[in-house]
Structures are given as C-alpha cells and as structure tokens.
Image (spheres, grey):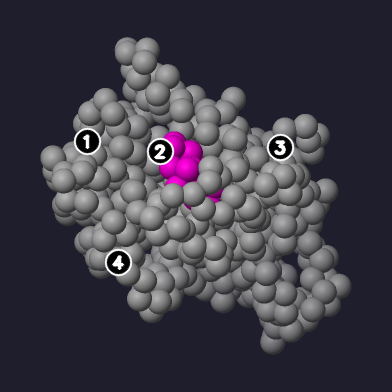
Amino acid sequence: MEESTVRDVETGSETGGEDALVGNVNKLMVSPPGYSGSPRKGHLVFDACFESGNLGRVDYISEFEFDLFIRPDTCNPRFRVWFNFTVENVRETQRIIFNVVNFSKTKSLYRDGMSPVVKSTSRPKWQRLPAKNVYYYRCPDHRRNYVMSFAFCFDQEDDVYQFAYCYPYTYSRLQHYLASLERRNLPYLKREQLGLSVQQRQLDLLTITNSDHLSPEREKKLVFLTARVHPGESPASFICQGVIDFLVSQHPVAQVLRDHVIFKIVPMLNPDGVYLGNYRCSLMGFDLNRHWQDPSPWAHPTLHAVKQLIVQMNQDPTVSLEFYIDVHAHSTMLNGFMYGNVFEDEERVQRQAVFPRLLCQNAPDFSFSNTSFNRDVVKAGTGRRFLGGLLDDTSYCYTLEVSFYSYMTAGSTAPVPYTEETYMKLGRNVARTYLDYYKLNNLIRDNRLTHIQSSEVMSQTVNRNGKGNVVGRDAADREKEKSPGVRQ
C-alpha cells in the first residue's frame, strides 16, 4: 500500500496521532510554512515508496531541522524501528538535523555509539555516519519519548541521499543473488520454491550437499538454517549469504562439509515484511517468530511450509536433523552470540554448549559470554523453542544473534562497527565451524588455509581418497582474525 503521505490524525489518546500513519511518504516536498511558488534548491524532497522503504511523515521545524516519523509495521502499530528513505533537491553545503521521534523501543545501541547508514548517488557504498553527529535522548517535546537526532551536511546538489537504520538487504537483492548462484550450475546446489507468501513472493529453499558422496546406508547429518523472520533485521541476510558463499565455494573445508553434511537454508522467511519495510511483522501484522506452534497455511504460509518440511525430515529414518539455527539481529547488544534451550539432562546441556564454544574459537566477533540458554514463556512460539521440544535429544536448536552495530574482540578497548563484509565473514565462520564440530579436520589435505576476500573461493582441492593432514589455520590467518580492524 503506497500513499503519498498521511497527516497526523488527532486521536486524543496517550500515544498520539502517529500510530495512524499507514503509508510511506511519496516524493514529498517539505517547504517552509506559507511558502508558495516553485520549489527552490534546499526544499527537501523525501521518498520512501520503494522496496524496504519506511518513512511515514515529515514535519518542518525550521530551515535546518525536520522531525521524521517511522511508519509502523503494516497492521501492527506496536513496532516502529526500521527506517529507510531518500532525500533529494538539496542545496550544496546545506546542514540539517533530522529527529527520528517515534521509536517504539527505548533501549537502543544509539546510546552506545551506533549511527544510521548513508549512501548517495555518487557514493553508492553504504557508510555509517560519524557517532559524534548522533544523539539519543528523552525529548520533552515528544511526550518524553526517545528521539534519535543526527546532523548531516549535504555536499553534492545533484545527488540523491539515502538513509537507513542498518544496511538494507531487500527481497530483490536476494532473488538476484540466488539467480546468479543458479546460473553457475553447481552440481551440489539445488534451489527450490518451498511455497509463496501471502503476497505471492517466493519462499526459497537451498540444499547444499555433494549427493554422490552420501552413502544410502549411512544416516545423513542435516543442518537447517533460516533467516529474516524479522524483516528489519537485515544483518541476518548478510550472515546467511556468508554461510551460502562459503558452502558453495571451492575452499577445501567447504568441499569436505558438502561430502558429509546436508545443508538446508531458507534465506528469507518473511519476504512480504522485508519488501514492505516492516521491522518485525508480516504483511498481516503477525510476529511470525511467535507462531511456530500452530502456523496457519493462510495467515502464516511461509512458516507453515518450513515447519511441514522440518517435521517431515524429522520423521525420515535416513536423515539425522542435528541443527536448527535461526539468524537474527539484536538492537541492544554487541557481538554475535546465541540463545539455546534449557534441558534437565546435564550431559545434553554440555553438548549444546559445544557448537557456540567452537564458533567462539573461529570467529573473533562471537561472544560465548553473551550466549545464554533460557525457557522464557514469551519465547515459547519461537523456532528455537518449538523445534527444541519437537526434535530428539541429539538435535540442537539455536537463535544466532548479531549486533546491529558492532563487536568487541578479545583485548580491544573500542567497539568495531560491523560492515556488510564483516557480517558475511561471521556467516563464513559459522559454516566452517561444522568442520570442527564433526571432527572432519583430518580430511583436509592442505593445512595452509588463509582467508581471501569475500566468499573465500580457493583453488585448493581435497584429496579424492579422503586422506590428508590435520588442518590448522596458519599463524598469519589467526593473527588476521584476531585483528580488531575491519577489512574494507
């Protein structure tokens, strides 16, 4: 639903009229009150009528200041966090302050140095705004709500500037990425349409394994991974792409993993919410991660399809469904970390901690101390909790969380902001940790594994008879991973 702009409807209620916002601004020119005539340079034009866009209203405060209102999730006024909009018709050297005034959350990483991301026509790579230009505070002018203000100076008159809560990763981007993978005709990669969303968007399922190497009489180990059940948690998509990039690469670790494990990946559980620019909900206002117990084929079709597949695989005697990981992003904590389930059996508790401990060794940004195991009542409908109860005691279900903002490495004193690349790197490290978990290290021939840029596609090959040296990443590789610096 796209409407030009919806002005405040005074409800007389405590929450104020911004809950009535139902559409995104559409090429909305904001000029001084009382101004008539043709628009001048510097009369800003705001737009959020594009994929994953979100901006519900703009109020002119002064020539230098504007109040911005986040449009709530469709059919659910409770959630107002994600924003993504463009600004054009700027004047060179024009300095402004934008106040995002109606966040639904109070705790935020904005208190810890997080800042929005920006790009422009002439600088298409997303960058974080300097933290010193961002302020997060309770504002008496907005019923003491929390406001995030940021200062910005436009420097190119002809550029269109885009601002977002975090690096966007749209449904279209995923479709282009999966289409490019398909064109490679990789024998160990299969893409299927598992179902359709309410608005008829594709629910994709990837299967990555070397089927020739799996013997029919031996039980197959299966790892199932999902992402973007909460649409505004875009870092989850970068992690998921990092996992996929690594598993389809020629890296020797990836080759061994494909020989011994089946990976099933659903990269976008909530494509409608992602497309619409929601933060947490589906088109119909449902938080899908609270509906695993009884998903409706009509109201929650993507969840219903994934649950059916998992239940079916769990009943297959030839398959051992060993892992379910649901990838999210966290708005108040740093680093990557996991949530797991609580068990009475102490041995099972210990076994569940093995994978996060191993991941901690492979990923300098993963925090075991932030990892926790719980059975909160409010989390009962989540994938982790529901599947933890459904699957047998050799299966482990986790939520993998990553900070919207930054990570701290061991020994560092300052947080390192995440980039698209470092999110993907965490995904690659999640994938490679299965080599350690399944004790397949002795099947690697070349023990000089080093990181290469992006998807780690390497020329080394695995010895076909499966024999070789025990792998250990070389010293240079370890030092590189310890380094708190972010590779651009």
Tell which circle, 3 or 1, labels the residue nearer the N-terminal end.
Answer: 1
Q: Is residue 155 visible?
A: yes
Q: Quadrant of the N terminus?
A: bottom left
Residue that carries the numbered disc 3 in the rendered image? 409
Q: Quadrant of the C terminus?
A: bottom right
| Front: mark 4 or 2 | 2
> Along the line of sight, which residue is nearer the eye, 50 or 405?
405
Element assignment for label 2: loop
Which residue sits at x=68%, y=69%?
A: 125
The amino acid on which the numbered mark 2 sits, given as a three-letter code, is Tyr
* Residue bounds of the magenta highlight: 427-444
Locate residue 327 relative to residue 302 in the image: left or right. right
The amino acid on which the numbered mark 3 sits, given as a three-letter code, is Thr
Q: Which mark is residue 191?
A: 4
Assess disc 3: are there few (<14), some (14-19) or many (≥20) residues with their C-alpha within 10 Å of its C-alpha. Answer: many
Q: Are marks 3 and 4 in contact (CB under 8 Å)?
A: no
The amino acid on which the numbered mark 1 sits, given as a three-letter code, is Gln
| Front: mark 3 or 1 | 3
